[in-house]
């Protein structure tokens, strides 16, 4: 089974930086994409950033220009560099990975989640 383990969360003052890491292990062939979601108190879980196997990236509008997602394919690890952090960024951040093929019965899409890492930004 695939397991995702996040690290790098913590407490930081507004304007500071953190780098989150997500390492994948288990029965991995390849991932179509990996990304980060976050869940803030009283909010829905939302996509923060994602990166495809081809290297294309997408970001939530609220973090674009401040966060950068990257991936080390050899290490099966994805990173989220978070700069200029704001109190609104406070949330539990979850790593996500996807493998398989859309509309394929032989290799259907599968998604995996990490346990989450807490990021707290003080004002």
Image (spheres, rainbow, N blue to C red):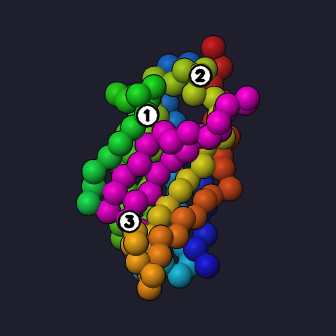
Residue 34, percent from left and from top: 44, 57
Q: What stretch is highlighted in magenta?
A: 30-53
Mark 3 vs 1: CB contact within 8 A = no
Give the class, few, some or many, for how many residues have Cα within 10 Å of label 2's Cα (few <14, many ≥20).
Answer: few
**Alpha carbons under labels 2 and 1: distance apart:** 13 Å
Q: Which residue is depicted at the point 55% across and 53% down? A: 95
Q: Which residue is depicted at the point 47% across and 64% down? A: 98
Q: Name the residue under label 1.
A: 60
Q: Mark 2 points at which residue?
A: 88
Give the class, few, some or many, for how many residues have Cα within 10 Å of label 1's Cα (few <14, many ≥20).
Answer: some
Mark 2 vs 1: CB contact within 8 A = no
Q: Is residue 22 above or below residue 37?
A: below
* Residue at the extreme top of the image, as rendered: 123
Give the number of the mark in front: 2 or 3: 3
Q: Which residue is depicted at the point 28% across and 51% down? A: 56
Position of the C terminus, as image quadrant, is top right
């Amino acid at each position: 089974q695939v397991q995702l383990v996040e690290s790098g969360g913590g407490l930081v003052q507004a304007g500071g930086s953190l780098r989150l890491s997500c390492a994948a292990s288990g029965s991995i062939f390849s991932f179509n994409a990996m990304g980060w979601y976050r869940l803030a108190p009283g909010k829905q879980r939302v996509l923060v950033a994602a990166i495809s196997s081809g290297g294309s990236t997408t970001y939530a509008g609220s973090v674009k220009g401040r966060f950068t997602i990257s991936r080390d394919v050899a290490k099966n690890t994805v990173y989220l560099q978070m700069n200029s952090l704001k109190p609104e960024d406070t949330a539990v951040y979850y790593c996500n990975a996807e493998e398989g093929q859309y509309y394929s019965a032989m290799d259907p899409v599968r998604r995996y989640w990490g346990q989450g890492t807490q990021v707290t930004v003080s004002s």
